[in-house]
Image (tube, helix red, strand yellow):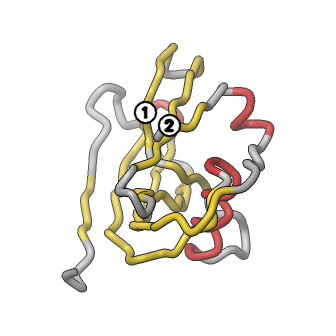
Amino acid sequence: MNDEELHLNLEDKEWPLTTIDHDRMIARAIVVDGDDNFYFVRANRDDDFGKATLIETAGGGVEPGENLDTAIRRELIEELGAEVEVICKIGVVSDYYNLIHRHNINNYYLCRVKSFGDKHLTQDEISVRRTYLM
């Protein structure tokens, strides 16, 4: 695999940019198992952006004092119940949510499942009724 990381910058064209008042560091993963099955999250949302059902990669916000490696491992246990091997960092997608004045810095990893156990969803994850897909 190439040692170069992919870097993408995405703009929000739907909502006007008035100000960005915070950055959110995020760790996300493309998750695959030994049989080449991929794992994603289905989230039913009803928020400032409207109602939607989304399929997205597993992952979430990096907590204060946490590094990216620890964050991705924690998020995958929380959301998928998966202990993983981090194969490599794919890259960074920088995007903006103008409506809520936020800049997301999404760090993407390729991870292979070592084992599955219990999920440890946070209350926020439970409240958006996430289901986890293979």
**Residue in the picture at 26% in, 75% down:** 5
Q: Specify whether 4 is left or right of 104.
A: left
**Badge 2: residue crowd in 10 Å (few <14, some 14–19, many ≥20):** some
Element type at mark 2: strand
Q: Which of these two is toward me, 62 or 28?
A: 28
Does residue 129 sit above or below 28 in this rendering? above
Q: Which of 121 and 106 is in front in this view?
A: 121
**Farthest bottom residue in view:** 3
Q: Circle 1: is it few (<14), some (14-19), or many (20+) Cα within 10 Å?
A: some
Looking at the image, residue 82 sits to the left or right of residue 39; the answer is right
Residue type at the position of mark 2: Leu
Residue at position x 24%, y 85% in the image: 3
Identify the residue at image location x=61%, y=57%: 76
Find disc 1 in the rendering and name its residue. 55
Say the numbered circle drawn on residue 133: 2
Q: Quadrant of residue 107?
A: bottom left
